Amino acid sequence: MTWKVKAREGDFIETVEGLIFDVKGFLHPPDRVIAYLRYLPDGRGTRQRNGIKYRKVYDLDARAYLLARRWPHYLYRCPVFNREVQAVPLDNVKSHCIPTERYAELRQKADLDPQERLAIGMVETLTNQTGISSSKIGVSGSILVGLHAAESDIDLVLYGTEASRQTHARLKSLLETRSEGFSPCGASDLRKLYKQRSLASAISFETFVRHEQSKVLQGTFRGTQYFIRCVKEWDELHEEYGDRKYYPIGMATLSATIVDDSESIFTPSTYQILHVELTGGAAIKPPSQIVSFRGRFCEQALIGERILAKGTLEKVVEKRGETHRLVIGEDPRDFLTVVGKSE
C-alpha cells in the first residue's frame, strides 16, 4: 500500500529493508520523500532494537557511498533541486516516525529508561517555562526510533513560528542563568560536536567554539547535550515542490553583511545578505541569501555582522524571475563564520 502521510524536517522514515532515514525539509517529489540515511542494520553495530543491531552513519559521503553500493534505488536525480539526493520511494516506506506522536507515546509509557525520562523532563520543563502547548513539541533523533544509548543526546522539534520564538527567548534566559537544569555546552561537549561533525577541514576548533558558545538551540539539560530543531507549521509554508527550480553553479566563497537573521533559528535556516564580495569560485551575480538544511548552521550569525561563507552557489528560477543563493552544509568543507561588525 502506498504511503500517504506528508513528511517534514524532524521526521524519520523506516524502509522495507530496515534502513532508517531522517527527513530533510518540506519539499518532496510526489512519489518519494527526500531523506538521508541515518541508521542501518549491522551485526557490528552498537545500537539495538527488537534484537537487531544497528549502526549510525553521520558523514554525508559515507551515507551516499553505502547507498550507491548496496541500495542505489535510494539515490535520486531530482529535477527540481537538479542534484542527486537521497530519497525514499513511497512504496518502500515501512513506517513514518513523527516526533509529536513519539512524545505522546512516551507520556503513556510506564517503564521509561533514563534517556526517555530525561527527554520527557526537558519537554515538560520547556512547556512549563514558556506556556506553549505540548502539541507544539516532539521528540526526534535516536529516541524517536528507539535506537538511543546511554550517551545519546536529546533531540527535540518545535513546531510553528510563535512557539519557536517564544521558547528560544525563554531558553536564552535559562541558559544565561543556568536555571532549571539548562547550561551552555562546555569545552568537552564542544570538542565532541567538533569531532562528530568532522569540521577539521572547514574551520579551526577555536573558531567553532566562538560560534557555538552563544547558541541557544543547543546546550546541556541535566548534564546531557540537547539540540532543538525549529520548523514551520504546514500553514506557514507557501512553496510547493516545483514552484521554483534550483540550479547548482559551483563552489564559492564570499564575504557579506547579514541584513536579516529572523529565519536563522529555523531548519532550513536562511540569512539575507548585502554588500557581497565573491572571493573564490564561480563569478555570477552576487547571491542575496544564504540557506542551510543542516541544523548546525542555525544561529550562526546576527544582523549587522560581517561574515565569510563557503558553499554551493545556486540559481533559483521561478515565474517572477531568478535570484541566486549560497547553500551551505552539503560539503564537509562548507562554513559560515563571523569576521566582524559591519561598518
Image (cartoon, rainbow, N blue to C red):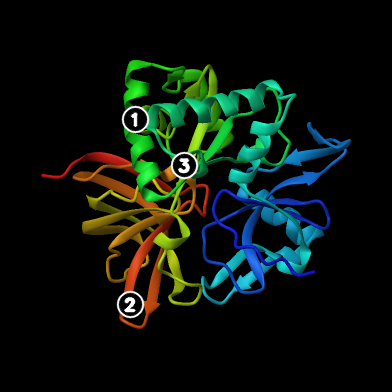
Task: Say which of 311 and 114 sits in front.
Answer: 114
- Given the image, on which type of amino acid does mark 3 rest? Arg
In the picture of the structure, the residue carrying the numbered disc 1 is 170
Give the distance between the C-alpha atoms of the residues marked 1 and 2, in whole angstroms.
Answer: 39 Å
At label 2, counting other C-alpha atoms closer than 10 Å, the crowd grade (few under 14, some 14-19, many 20 or more) is few
Outermost left residue? 343
Q: Secondary structure at mark 2?
A: strand
Q: Which of the two discs, 1 and 2, labels the residue nearer the N terminus?
A: 1
Q: Quarter holding the N terminus? A: bottom right
In the picture of the structure, the residue carrying the numbered disc 3 is 296
In which quadrant of the rendered view does residue 172 lie?
A: top left
The picture places residue 107, in percent across and down from the top left corner, at 64, 32
Residue found at x 63% / y 45%? 101
Q: Quarter holding the C terminus? A: top left
- Residue 79 lies, with reference to residue 55, above or below; the image says below
In-image side of 132 versus 143 (left or right): left
In-image side of 284 versus 266 (left or right): left
Q: Nearer the viewer, mark 1 or mark 3?
A: 1
At label 3, counting other C-alpha atoms closer than 10 Å, the crowd grade (few under 14, some 14-19, many 20 or more) is some
Q: Which of the two discs, 1 and 3, labels the residue nearer the N terminus?
A: 1
Residue found at x 47% / y 25%? 125
Q: Which of the two discs, 3 and 2, labels the residue nearer the N terminus?
A: 3
Count of all numbered marks drawn on residues in the image: 3
Query: Which labelled disc corresponds to residue 203?
Result: none
In the picture of the structure, the residue carrying the numbered disc 2 is 322
In which quadrant of the rendered view does residue 109 lie?
A: top right
- Residue 42 lies, with reference to residue 92, above or below; the image says above
- Given the image, on which type of amino acid does mark 2 rest? Glu
At label 1, counting other C-alpha atoms closer than 10 Å, the crowd grade (few under 14, some 14-19, many 20 or more) is some
The picture places residue 141, in percent across and down from the top left corner, at 62, 40
